[in-house]
């Protein structure tokens, strides 16, 4: 199903009934990433899956594709579906969109779970890496995406997930270079939501990877130790929904 946004059709799926739980995929992913846990989650929740702009079956938005604009696009879907309050789960970039949503629509936000995601803005070093990736995308896109996806998995266990890595690469390459560059820029420019994450009164949880090369789990535990944030550190890298599926699915089901 879809909903109009700036003359663009955003794609979503809806399952089950009960309390609303919205799952937001990460960069170079799509709503299919949640399929493995849908059966169990839809027995407890009304589950909404969304293809974020430039991913899956959703085109880029006509004008702004920043995290705030994506959050408003997500809200347009909630308005269409008469969602009054929602718990959000966001993987990586999906977490950034969820944070932007929580800032814009606090009265609708019942809880927020960040999976391999952070409320912090990009560091100067991370911004340089994004700029390099943007430059590479215009020259050798397939090699860039292939390398990027491989690095998301824990190097210690990558041999266990060769098939999953191949599948993830195939799906990632469905994202166009234009969407890749647009979303990299949007993530580079996103604001810092650390204060929101510390002070918001909705339910807050983080699931982080012990070997995630993008997010330092121990740093997150220390930084948010005094905030009311439940933090689980699981074995794996940046793709915990694949590397540690059972535990992640269980934690989301009990969120």
Image: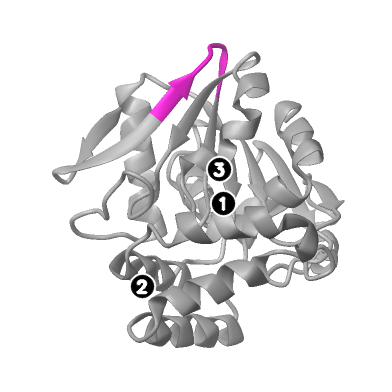
Which residue is the site of mark 1?
Answer: 95
Could you classify mark 1 by the number of other residues whose Cα lies within 10 Å: few (under 14), some (14-19), or many (20 or more)? many
Res 191 visible: yes
Crowd around label 2: few <14 · some 14–19 · many ≥20 (10 Å): some
The answer to which image quadrant residue 154 occupies is bottom right
In this rendering, the answer to whether 229 lies above or below 12 is: below
The residue sitting at 67% across, 49% down in the picture is 115
> Along the horizontal axis of the image, is 63 left or right of 158?
left
Does 14 appear in magenta?
yes
**Of the numbered discs in the image, which one, if any, rests on residue 181?**
2
Q: Is residue 228 magenta?
A: no
Please indicate, yes or no, whether residue 121 appears anywhere in the rendered image: no
**For mark 3, what is the residue?**
33
Q: Main SS of the magenta segment?
A: strand
Q: Percent position (x, y) of residue 76?
A: 31, 35
Q: Position of residue 73 (x, y in %)?
A: 32, 43
- Provide the residue span drawn in magenta: 13-20
Under circle 1, the secondary element is helix
Q: Earlier in the sequence, mark 1 or mark 2?
A: 1
Q: Quadrant of the N terminus?
A: top left
Q: Which residue is located at x 72 percent, y 72 percent? A: 213
Mark 3 vs 2, N-terminal side? 3
């Amino acid at each position: 199903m879809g909903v109009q946004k700036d003359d663009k059709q955003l794609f979503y799926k809806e399952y089950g009934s009960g309390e609303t739980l919205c799952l937001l995929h990460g960069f170079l992913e799509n709503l299919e990433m949640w399929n493995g846990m849908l059966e169990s989650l839809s027995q407890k929740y009304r589950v909404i899956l969304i293809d974020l702009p430039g991913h899956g079956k959703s085109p880029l938005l006509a004008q702004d594709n920043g995290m705030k604009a994506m959050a408003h696009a997500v809200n347009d879907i909630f308005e269409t579906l008469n969602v009054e309050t929602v718990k959000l789960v966001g993987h990586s970039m999906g977490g950034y969109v969820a944070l932007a949503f929580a800032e814009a629509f606090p009265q609708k936000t019942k809880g927020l779970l960040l999976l391999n995601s952070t409320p912090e803005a990009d560091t100067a070093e991370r911004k340089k890496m994004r700029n390099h990736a943007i430059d590479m995308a215009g020259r050798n896109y397939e090699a860039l995406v292939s390398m990027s996806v491989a690095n998301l998995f824990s190097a210690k266990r990558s041999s266990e997930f060769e098939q999953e890595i191949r599948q993830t690469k195939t799906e990632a390459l469905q994202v166009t270079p234009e969407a890749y560059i647009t979303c990299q820029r949007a993530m580079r420019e996103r604001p810092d939501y650390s204060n929101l994450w510390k002070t918001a009164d909705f339910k807050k949880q983080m699931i982080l990877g012990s070997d995630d090369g993008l997010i330092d789990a121990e740093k997150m535990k220390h930084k948010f130790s005094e905030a009311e944030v439940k933090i689980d550190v699981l074995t794996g890298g940046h793709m915990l929904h694949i590397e540690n599926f059972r535990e992640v699915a269980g934690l989301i089901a009990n969120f």
